[in-house]
Image (cartoon, helix red, strand yellow):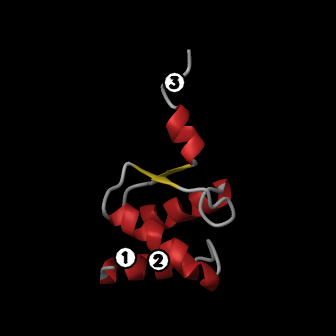
Amino acid sequence: MSRDAAELADKYIQAKVVGKTSRADCQHIAIATLCHADVLVSWNFKHIVNLDRIRGYNGINFQNGHQMIEIRTPKEIFNYGNEE
């Protein structure tokens, strides 16, 4: 993990998007953000795939000049384009 990713993860925690015990989740999101991932997929509804938290992560990203990140569940991704 890069220093930039660690610093961004710490900013999520400092902004109270999640608590200190969710540092690994914040690092995951920071890495995906800095690597310009198209989407981050997770089943973690408590700390990641949660509308208030997604807004929090993206608010910090915006304030720090980073892209917004799409965060979705696997079901949303696997069903995409399969509707008839």
Give the residue pinned by disc 3: 82
In the rendering, at what x and y percent does residue 38 appear?
37, 48
| Cα separation between marks 2 and 3 | 35 Å
Residue at 48 percent across and 82 percent down: it is 10
Give the residue pinned by disc 1: 5
Seen in the picture, residue 54 relative to 6 is either above or below; the reply is: above
In the depicted view, which residue is nearer to us: 84 or 37?
84
Q: Which label sits in the foreground, 1 or 3? A: 3
Q: Which label sits in the foreground, 2 or 3? A: 3
Q: Earlier in the sequence, mark 2 or mark 3?
A: 2
Q: Is residue 35 left or right of residue 71?
A: left
Seen in the picture, residue 35 relative to 77 is either above or below; the reply is: below
Identify the image quadrant of the C terminus.
top right
Mark 2 touching mark 1, by CB under 8 A? yes
**SS at mark 1 in the image:** helix
In the depicted view, which residue is nearer to us: 78 or 61?
78
Residue at 35 percent across and 54 percent down: it is 37
- Label 3 sits on what residue type? Asn
In the rendering, at what x and y percent does residue 27 appear?
45, 75
Q: Residues within 10 Å of mark 1 (few under 14, many from 20)?
A: many
Q: Quadrant of residue 3?
A: bottom left
Q: Is residue 5 visible?
A: yes
Give the residue pinned by disc 2: 9
In the rendering, at what x and y percent does residue 36 appear?
32, 56
Q: Residues within 10 Å of mark 2 (few under 14, many from 20)?
A: many
**SS at mark 3 in the image:** loop
Residue at 55 percent across and 56 percent down: it is 42
